Amino acid sequence: MLWNEVRKTYSNKCIVFDSLKQHEENNKLIIEDVAIIEVFDDINDAFKCYRMLHRKDKTRELSFGSTKE
């Protein structure tokens, strides 16, 4: 799912996701395509989920973020 689609589908939410396609541009990580894992209202809950999943498998390209504007 493209990030613009994520923002429309899950507006004002916090998302834990697998990064499927990404690249670096001007020292910034640009995430193009993601697979949604969990959706939260609170960034702290999203971080807890991310941390738990990352501890289980450090090879995954996991991230978390907010669609809040």
Image: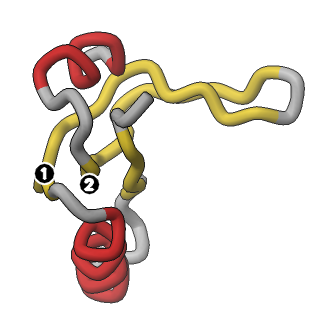
Q: Which type of secondary structure does the marked residue at label 2 adopt?
A: strand
Residue 64 appears in which quarter of the rendering?
Answer: bottom left
The residue under the point 43% across, 26% down is 21
Q: Is residue 21 above or below residue 54?
A: above
The CA distance from mark 1 to mark 2 is: 6 Å
Q: How is colour applied across the structure in the image? A: secondary structure
Q: Which type of secondary structure does the marked residue at label 1 adopt?
A: strand
| Residue density around tag 1, few if under 14, some if 14–19, many if 20 or more, within 10 Å | some
Left or right position of 62 against 22? left
Q: Which mark is residue 39?
A: 1
Earlier in the chain: of badge 1 and badge 2, it is 2
Residue 54 appears in which quarter of the rendering?
Answer: bottom left
Residue 20 visible here = yes
The residue under the point 34% across, 87% down is 55
Q: Are marks 1 and 2 in contact (CB under 8 Å)?
A: yes
| Residue density around tag 2, few if under 14, some if 14–19, many if 20 or more, within 10 Å | many
Report the amino acid beneath label 2: Val
The number of discs equals: 2
Q: Which mark is residue 7?
A: none
Check disc 2 and report the residue beneath it: 16
Q: Is residue 50 above or below residue 64?
A: below
Residue 63 appears in which quarter of the rendering?
Answer: bottom left
Residue 44, percent across and down? Answer: 34, 74
